[in-house]
Amino acid sequence: MKVKKLQLVLMAMLIAVPTLIFSQAKITGLQIIENVYNRETGNDSQGDLTMSLINSRGDQRVRKIKQFVKDFGDMEKSIMFFVSPADVRNTSFMNWSYDDAGKDDDQWIYLPALKKVKRISSDSKSDYFMGSDFTYDDLGDRHPTEDNHKLLREETIDGENCYVVESIPKDEDYMYSRTVVWIIKDKSIGLKKEFYDEDEELLKTLTNKKYEKIKGYWIILSSEMFNVQKDHTTKMELANVKLDTGIPANKFTERMMKRGLK
Amino acid sequence: MRKLNFKIFWVVFALFVFINGAQAQTLNWSGYARNYTGMLLTENNEYAILQNTFNLNIEQSKDKVAYKVNPYIYQYPNQEMEIGLREAYMDIYFNAVDLRIGKQQIIWGKADGVFITDIVSPKDLSEFLLRDFDEIRMGVTSLKANYYLGDNTFEFVWAPNFVSTQMPDESSIWFPQLDFPTAPVFDYSQKEVGAKLENSEVFAKFSAITSAMDFEIMGGYAWDDDPTMHIAKNSTGLTVTPRHHRLGLAGGSFSSTLGGFVLRGEGAYYNGKYFNSEDPKLTDGTVKKNYIHYLVGLDYTLWDIRLSSQFIQQAILDYEKPIKNDEYENTMTVLASKDFLRETLRLELFSYIGLNNSDALIRPKVIYDLADGFELLLGANIFVGDAGRFGQYDGNDMVYAKVKYSF
């Protein structure tokens, strides 16, 4: 099982109201993307994530995860407990990420069969998360400065007024040649996103199906990534979301990785 | 005895289920059923193993307490059934202290597949090193106390009763080659270590995880898990008397990330370990020496292939030539693993390589998740060389299949 930077799974679902209001006339593509990236997400959060992988024949595999995230000021710690399938139950994963953009995350995995916490290296952000259609970058960790952003137009989708922003990576070797995202103007939530491969062909579409405001933060509760070329879909659903509950700092320790969800 | 044990097991199991029926909602059941079929690559196509396994984890936790019981059954069509409890313990959680009491597997160190500071739980080598690691580690009845201070942990273990390494039966294909000039007579009268307080084992460890590095420092006053073979020559030949000896050790391990690499190290100093010697002046063919065992390892990913390699050295200090072991024994391990088909198919190659004897154990595997929790595994164990720790099993090359359902 491949795991890394998993704290982003929950955080990617938490998209808050922008703290700055720009006038419509002056806002740039970069500012729109920064508003999404620099969202407020509270001091801590927890939730149950269900990820359904559905292939072209309709066969479905389900992964369930319980996750906790806490902001420690200059760093953020997250811990993730795998609930199902049965053969990965009680596996846990901990990530420490740093505000310092030059500092790599620290990551550990606890494998119950080995009864040992192992330090692992951060994997590529272009890797897919647990066999799903989401890469780690797709889950929200890609910094706005890594792409050139251009506001293409404004559109209304499902009654929501959206900015349409095209993002082209500065790194020519990146897995996407460009992405186009529809961002709800007054919520800074990405409502829809298209990913184009290196040959400029449409690769994937991401659609956010359900979002709610909880404790002042916009939370995306259901989203769907469809790989157009492989006819494969990943549905992500978040439930039992709790924000700012004061999760104790010792939740994010080797002790708790071994103890699991007891 | 096995049949009686089996009946007792099911009676206890049924009672347990009955007693817990009322609180079944909070009881956590998990485990697996598995078939394991292995065939030797010999002209006769003999089976190396035919085994059906049932492994059950029963766990329950409340606010400050928890327990776990892990019964297992190995059933064989051609030999006696084996049943037992891999673990059976209770946890008590305090603010900064956890206590675990009962039979438990205790795993220390940063090495993979090598036992240096990881000596608290003895090993079951009934099938050499081929079993999964949770099956090689034997639970040991002990009291474990952990004190936590941030990301630092102080751990203390008291094992009141010594348990030795489980060796293969003499009739097993995994029984190690004996290096004696003539067939000896074994005298097992001194093999057991008496069950009394002064024969306890104690271990202590300090460990920490930090952004820069994880590390452990440990020490122990133990028994050597492997018995020393005391040899006596008499008029009828050789008499070999296996006996365990006390062993003090101190060591540590670390793990750190360097870019995309994880660098690991582990080492221990063993004070007073016995070795067999051919020095004619010795009356029982053994000599006591201090000994160092260490490892360095590197984990990295290249072209989506997870790679890991380790170099291990065992060094006998103040070495004397008649000692049967080499002064330095060098071993390597290599692991390569890659996932396919959305992480449902995994190809893996793991190998131990003995550098002194140019021998090796090569273990290729293909693992396919037919459905969530349902795993098919095809693998081979290829022994290379004709001497040494791995080469001695050159005739035991085998292919095998495991079908496992986890619940």
Image (cartoon, coloured by chain):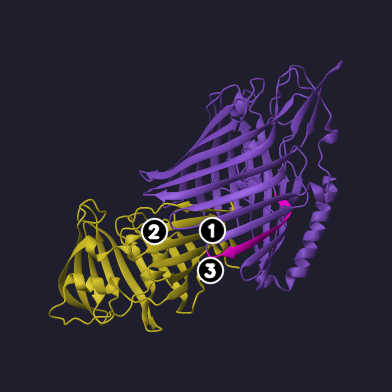
- Stretch in magenta: B139-150
Quarter occupied by the C terminus of chain B: bottom right
Camera-side residue of B222 and A121: B222
Instruction: Please name the color used to draw chain A.
Output: yellow
**Position of residue B45 measured from the top left corner of the image (x, y, whole percent):** 63, 28
Expressed as whole percent of the image width and height from the top left, the position of residue B283 reads 79, 22
Tag 3: amino acid: Asn
Is residue B137 among the parts visible in the rendering?
A: yes
Name the residue tied to disc 1. A91
Mark 3 secondary-structure assignment: helix
Q: Is mark 1 on a helix, strand or loop?
A: loop
Sooner in the amino-acid sequence: mark 1 or mark 3: 1
Residue type highlighted by circle 1: Thr
Q: Eyeballing the image, is B114 above or below A261? A: above
Mark 2 or 3 closer to N-term? 2
Q: In which quarter of the image is residue B124?
A: top right
**Disc 2 target residue:** A105
The image quarter in which residue A129 lies = bottom left
| SS at circle 2 | loop
Left or right, residue A235 beside residue B84 = left
Subunit of label 3: A
Instruction: Name the residue beneath numbered marker 3.
Output: A250
Of the chain colours in the picture, the one used for chain B is purple
Q: Which of marks 1 and 2 is in front?
A: 2
Q: How crowded is mark 2: few (under 14 residues within 10 Å), some or many (20 or more)?
A: many
Question: What amino acid type should be assigned to the residue bearing mark 2?
Answer: Asp
- Marks 2/3 same chain: yes
- What is the distance, in whole Å, between disc 2 and disc 3 at their CAs? 19 Å
